[in-house]
Amino acid sequence: MRRLHHFLFVRHRHNWVLLGRFGLVGASGVLVNMMTLIIVKKLGPEAREAIVGIPFTDFNVRWYHVYSTIAFVVANLWNFQLNRSWTFRSSHRAVWWREYLPFFAVGLLGQLVGLVLLTLLMHEGSPLHLSEEVFDNSTGLRTRLYWAQLIVIAVVTPVSFVLNKLWTFAAVRTHHPDLADPRHVHEVLGEPADESMTPDARVTTPAPAGRRDPGA
């Protein structure tokens, strides 16, 4: 048990710290997403009002698609900047836009999936349509768009996580091999680095007693 405890909570303590920070950033991102959605909905036209028809379909781009996308962009920037400056502390290791582009691309793909789900939740003819008797828009807690957006976030977040793990994080490891340096772990945790823990550290074996180095 002591070995298991040491393996999980001592050797991999930095992973738990990063996971906690990542989770806090994600939770704050949900709040930012919903707050942005509420603000733009209150400032803009009625959410279900059609803007333009989608060619060869009976569907339209509606204002709630725009509101959801604006909320995504704001929350995506928020999450990225916090993860860059606080969770992984990589802000000084690469140009901002080079790290952000793959992060944004993964998020955008998730948002496209989310817009399809949002349409199914909001459209009257969909089998997934949220009940208008329950979500009648009479109060903030009964606003159909808000609950639809929360459902979208809950569904899309795991998809985005998998895509980030398979692509974004792999790209970071490829272009920033120094992140595998144990000294970076100490840097992320705010601890003094151990100079002996480097990828190039060599283990030297002391010469047997009484034997002198010929070059000495």
Image: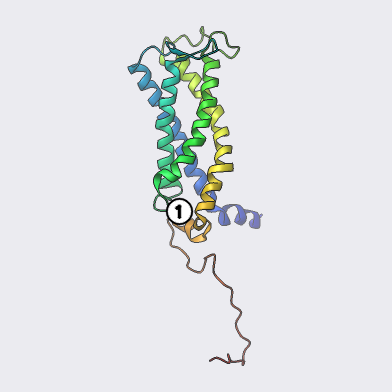
Q: As drawn, is 8 to the left or to the right of 70?
A: right
Of the residues shown, which amino acid type is indicated by label 1? Answer: Val
User: Residue shown at 60%/82% (left/top)?
Assistant: 206
Where is residue 3 shown, x and y percent of the image?
65, 57
Quarter of the figure with residue 51: top left
Q: Is residue 88 visible?
A: yes
Of the 4 image quadrants, the one containing the N terminus is bottom right
Which residue lies most toward the left here? Answer: 43
Q: Nearer the viewer, residue 67 or 15?
A: 67
Looking at the image, is 82 positioned above or below residue 196?
above
27 or 74, which is in the foreground? 74
163 lies above or below 207: above
Q: Which residue is mark 1?
A: 188
Name the residue located 38 percent from the left edge and 18 percent from the top edge: 41
Asked whether, in this view, residue 212 is left or right of residue 86, the answer is right
Residue 159 x %, y %: 57, 33
Position above or below: 136 against 26: above
**Percent x, y for residue 124?**
54, 8
